[in-house]
Image (spheres, rainbow, N blue to C red):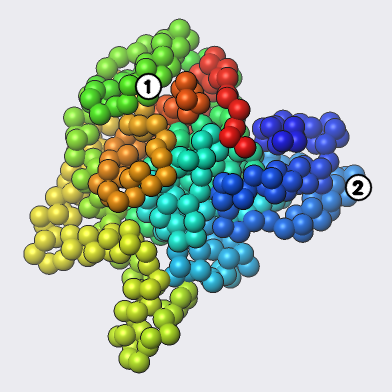
Amino acid sequence: MNEVCRLSLKQLRDAVKRRSLSFKEIAEAYLERIDEAEHHLRAFVTVADESVVDQAADLDDRLARGDLRLGYLTGLPIGVKDNIVTKDVRTTCGSRILDNWVPPYDATVVRKLKANEALLFGKTNCDEFAMGSSTENSAHYPTRNPWDLDRVPGGSSGGSGSAVAARLVPAALGSDTGGSIRQPAAFCGVVGLKPTYGRISRYGLVAFGSSLDQIGPLANTVRDAAVMLQVLAGRDQADSTSANSPVDNYLSQIGKDVHGLRVGVPAEWMGSGLDREVKTAVQDALKVLESLGCCIEEVLLPHTSYAVATYYIIAPAEASANLARYDGVKYGYRSSQKDTLAQMYENSRTEGFGDEVKRRIMIGTYVLSSGYYDAYYLKASKVRTLIRQDYLKAFERVDLIVGPTTPTLPFQLGEKTSDPLAMYLSDVFTVTANLAGVPALSMPCSFTADKLPVGLQLIGPHFKEGRLLRVAHALESELQLNRPPLAL
Ligand code: GLN
């Protein structure tokens, strides 16, 4: 691998500033790396062509002329999950039903990346409509884990996780409805941040569970995740759920001391069902936090055992409503079997959606249907409030919560595809942050003897992303993790 691809966003920018690297050299290095590794990983659905080199050369010319302001991401390659719309670039959501869809506009996050003159290096693979935990539900192909090609990269933003870990791009966007940024970040050994609900505009994110969805970054360092958040965060007129509260200076948190911070460890998360190696790695990381001056104490999140059940009622309910728009009329796939209008709808959806998406539509329609609404959807909404209150109560005592991101290490391809319940259970530690709307970050805290990464999850009160980044950076600096060689 070209050494350029080992650099962080910050190092790349510094190198350009010093004029020791040109934008063209960076673009060429990453294209070469993609060429070398992508056919093993299949992290992308659509990948940049040589035209990015021309764009980079253009930026070099402007820089030489003094006609370019160097933003945080100027000229740097970024991957975008394929459920975030990109003008004139095919956006499939990992689904057959949108296989040929080319959006006429950019998502707000993409507009912001472009305003920073970042280079769009491709659309990353994901589970169909972001429903899944392994990227095996993509209608295109599964993506592989760069630490062990027989294992999944996690999901649903598995393409972004895999591409960032394997250095096909220095950073990427993902979306997180129940863990889809953090779980692949954990499985791929990178940093993934799900901000507070509403912190980043979702205009142009293809809706899955609208009360849960949030866009966020995946990157190789905590500082790079902070840089991405700094660029992306903020109120957007086009998304009425985006928050009005001021955007903090996240980068100023990097390098700050964490002495005296109170860290809560959920008792319910460290018990049975947690893989032994994951548990040891999390406990070791907690000891390091303690050595940095944090006070570690136990907290209770008593409604944890209802989290997966609650999520798998609310998310499918919202999905079933959101996915009603794919009817073969307005956009996407239309069946050729269409003698009547009703047949056209039915066949387009039957042929266009994959099994998991159909399962969610059926569950969602069922839990919302009259006679069952109160027993399922309404009840789940009430339990959701209890889960949120668990967090609010815990945050009266502690500044942040730390625990595992996932109950297991990255699993084998095919291991859980025939058992949806087993797949759903991999989300047990991630769904609660979405249900409560709080920010959560996953960072690598260890590699096992088998060279598999372990993710540590940090969860904070609403809008305290800066605190998470501060603690994560302190821990990252102290750990100085020794990464094993990639599988490719
Ligand atoms: N794995 C969870 C699901 O299948 C979460 C997905 C997500 O966050 N988009 O719904």
Farthest bottom residue? 339
Residue at 57 percent of width and 70 percent of height? 102
Is residue 65 in view from this perspective? Answer: yes
Residue at 39 percent of width and 31 percent of height? 409
396 over 73 or under it: above or below: above
Residue 431 found in image quarter? top left
Secondary structure beneath label 1: helix
Residue 280 found in image quarter? top left
> In the rendered structure, which amino acid carries the disc numbered 1?
Glu
Mark 2–mark 1 distance (CA, rounded to whole Å): 54 Å
Task: Name the residue tied to disc 2.
Answer: 65
Q: Find residue 218 and report its horizontal and vertical position in percent.
A: 54, 40
Q: Is residue 66 left or right of residue 454?
A: right
> Is the CB of the residue bearing disc 2 within 8 angstroms of ligand 1?
no
Q: Find residue 191 and report its horizontal and vertical position in percent.
A: 52, 33
Q: Residues within 10 Å of mark 2 (few under 14, many from 20)?
A: few
Q: Find residue 232 and report its horizontal and vertical position in percent.
A: 56, 45
